[in-house]
Amino acid sequence: MYRALIAGVGHFVPERIVSNFELEKMMETSDEWIRERTGIIERRWINEEDNNADLAQRASLKAIEQAGLEVEDIDFIILATLSTDYFFPGTGCFLQEKLGLPGIGALDIRNQCSGFVYGLSIADQYIKTGMYKNILLVGSEVQSRGLDFTTRGRDVAVIFGDGAGAAVISRSKDNKKGVLATCLHADGRHAKELWQELPGSARKPMMSHAIIDEPGIYPYMNGRYVFKHAVTKFPEVIMEVLQTAGVDKSEIDLVIPHQANMRITEAVRMKLELSEEKVYSNIQKYGNTTAASIPIAISEAIEEGRIKEGSLVCLAAFGSGFTWASALIRF
Ligand code: ACO
């Protein structure tokens, strides 16, 4: 059996920085409210000319370069996003076209904030069984084109940002490094507490002029309900993956949680009794970038020297579905 190694990681965030003060001009909100409740100071918004697949491509090229590979070495693509460029086909196909890799498999997964960790678990299985050698795994989001930037949508609109992160997951025979364990969960009973209802085929007919005026075309979040579940499920799934891998909490060098909200991250850190240096946060700069948040954070943590050769890193995510997931990786 092979081991799945993170051979390279890269990220790309759009140049346009949108501060909380800029949002104050669009809706009734304040820098103070946003910072206090979420920890977010600014986020990035995509340029007019780009789409989701463009962000994904730029992050991917960096990851492939860091892995010391050529684009042609990639033999499978997994792309996690909730903000696809088109209703269908998936953004993975558009990324594949942009990378010039016709013929290789491209799989889109829709697991929202847990998408990258779900994708890592899928890649891990394909690598272990020998099906693929170098899988490109991407989390990429364009949230800024789908939010309600009036006061009506302020609880959600201030949280999300755009960006992409990518990793090359490669085959290795080194038993000490790579993905040690992954844990995946979902509970559809809570699906409507964090969701976007429209457009969807549950509506008959799916499309009409009238739906444009419905609140269901924007994401809905029951903030307190999400908070309550997130602060329980994050620690649970972190402890589960440690137990699965037979590793003690004290051995972890860095926890990278999905960047949902600074208050959630802080509550999880305190519950697990981890020091501040052991939990990574960059939500201040980017907001919540859903499936992209974990790979962007891994990429920055490597750049900052917080992940080194041999580091034991725990990834954890919670989000819409509800879905939650974790992974333990030796770099
Ligand atoms: N600016 C100013 N005021 C606002 C804003 C805003 N952007 N949004 C909501 N408010 C108002 C509300 O309307 C409410 O006003 P009212 O008292 O007059 O009714 C007041 O602020 C307080 O609202 P609450 O919902 O009670 O505020 P709360 O303290 O719960 O904070 C928040 C809201 C930040 C959403 C919180 O519930 C939370 O952190 N939830 C976790 C959800 C989350 O972070 N999700 C991330 C995305 S999902 C994921 O990645 C897992």
Image (tube, rainbow, N blue to C red):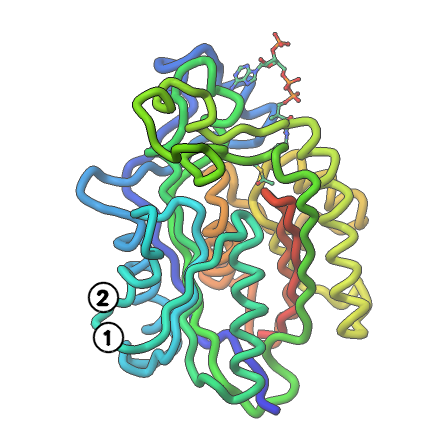
The 10 Å Cα crowd at callout 1, few under 14, some 14 to 19, many 20 or more, is few
Residue bearing mark 2: 97
In the picture as drawn, the residue positioned furthest to the top comes out as 28
Taking the spot 44% from the left edge, 46% from the top edge, the residue there is: 82
Taking the spot 39% from the left edge, 33% from the top edge, the residue there is: 205
Location of residue 94 by image quarter: bottom left
Name the spot of residue 95 as percent of width and height, x first.
29, 62
In the picture as drawn, the residue positioned furthest to the left comes out as 49
Q: Are marks 1 and 2 in contact (CB under 8 Å)?
A: yes
Q: Is residue 261 above or below residue 187?
A: above
- Cα distance, mark 1 to mark 2? 6 Å
Q: Secondary structure at mark 1?
A: loop
Q: Secondary structure at mark 2?
A: helix
Location of residue 143 by image quarter: top left
Q: In front here: 49 or 277?
A: 49
Q: Is residue 250 above or below residue 290?
A: below
Name the spot of residue 56 as percent of width and height, x first.
33, 57
Name the spot of residue 171 as percent of width and height, x first.
50, 85
**Which numbered dot is residue 102?**
1
Q: Is residue 52 above or below residue 19?
A: below
For badge 2, the amino acid type reads Glu
Location of residue 67 by image quarter: bottom left
The 10 Å Cα crowd at callout 2, few under 14, some 14 to 19, many 20 or more, is some
Taking the spot 50% from the left edge, 54% from the top edge, the residue there is: 297
Please identify the quadrant where the C terminus is shown. bottom right
